[in-house]
Image: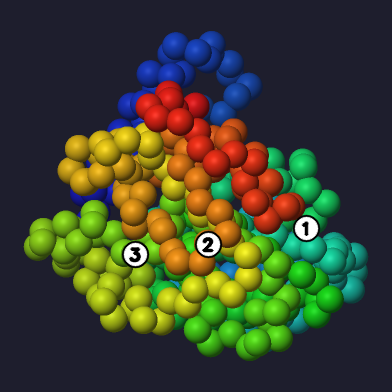
Amino acid sequence: MCSCVVSSCLLLIAASEAESKETHPPNKAEKHWVSTVFDNFTSATDALQWSDIRVINNWRIQQHAQSKTYRVLNLNDEVVAEGTLDLCSRHFSKLIKNGDIDPFVGNKAVIVIHGLGEGRSAMKPLVTYLQDNMAASIMTFGYASPQATLAAHAHALGKVLAGLPPTTAVSFVGHSMGNLVVRRWLQNAQPEMIGRVNRMVMLGPPNQGSDLARLAAHNHWLKTLASGAAGELVLHWDTIRHDLQTPTFEYGIIAGGKGDNEGYSSILEGDDDAIVRVSETKLNGADGFLIIPVRHSRMMRNPDVQKETLNFLQRGRFAKTTYGINIPEK
């Protein structure tokens, strides 16, 4: 595992060096590109260790997946307190009392949830777009995706929802496994809380499991590395799928694909976004289904995905019914 992390980091460094030489002239006042790459790498790795349990205007209390310690992060994701839950909760309340945290949450909130192996920063392009175009509080929910089970992530999401004002209506936007976290939360959620959910947009959701994960299950090395929610997806799908509820509120699905029978991956059958097959995203009862030519990891930055997500959140429907076949990816 360590060698994989180091190799990934070295690849990032090499790519960044090439980009730096081509597009960025030297500037002694700027931070060296190596420092920037390592800072970003460290930040992404850190995000995979912590889950949010309270979020108010994107200030947050988080719990570490392994050590069970807690911390408070400010708007810039800087740690301002760390220790027991009681200590962090008292510090959080003090920040609200002193006016550092604005406790106001509007009548509408959208909670954006990242996928497996990602952090909240992966959703930033979509979050920024929604903030610029919606009259709602746009919040992100972060969870230690490879460190704990879907049930644990769903429990953490429930705590965040419980911390919102009872008058706030909630909508969700999930990417990949983030959608399964919401569906798992529905299994144990109180009816009155479910009743406060307005709509949901699912981006590339493995609603029917993942053939890619099943292929990984046949590889001994990958199988031994699978843990937490990733392990459940790879090894125990037939068990966890029974705990994934179908939303009773309005929801739409955006799948990535070419609109043909080939997709972006050479090892998956049928159309796909290079990670999830289009057929795997489907779920009975959806109020809208759309295929957009985009790869799985690029959905949050794709302008068509952003616009259609906004359309569904505001109107309960997508603007288009199709984006054609073999249209170049934006």
- Local crowd at mark 1 within 10 Å, few (<14), some, or many (≥20)? many
User: How far from the left and from the top, in percent, is residue 45?
Assistant: 43, 54
Q: Is residue 69 above or below residue 322?
A: below
Relative placement, left or right, of 318 versus 165 is: left
The mark total stands at 3
Residue ID for mark 3: 208
User: From the viewer's perspective, is the residue at label 1 or at label 2 nearer?
Assistant: 2
SS type, badge 2? loop
Q: Nearer the viewer, residue 128 or 41?
A: 128
Task: Say which residue appears at 26% left-offset and 76% top-offset.
Answer: 238
User: Residue 267, position in %: x, y?
Assistant: 18, 43
Q: Secondary structure at mark 3?
A: loop
Q: Is residue 115 above or below residue 267?
A: below
Give the x, y percent position of residue 218: 10, 61
Q: Nearer the viewer, mark 3 or mark 2?
A: 2
Q: Is residue 62 left or right of residue 47?
A: right
Query: Alpha-carbon neighbours of circle 2 within 10 Å: few (<14), some, or many (≥20)?
Result: some
**Would you name the residue on which mark 2 appears?**
286
Q: What's the CA distance linking mark 1 and mark 3?
A: 31 Å
Vertically, is 308 above or below 75? above
Q: Which mark is residue 137?
A: 1
Location of residue 305 by image quarter: top right
Along the viewing direction, whichever of 254 and 157 lies nearer the viewer: 254
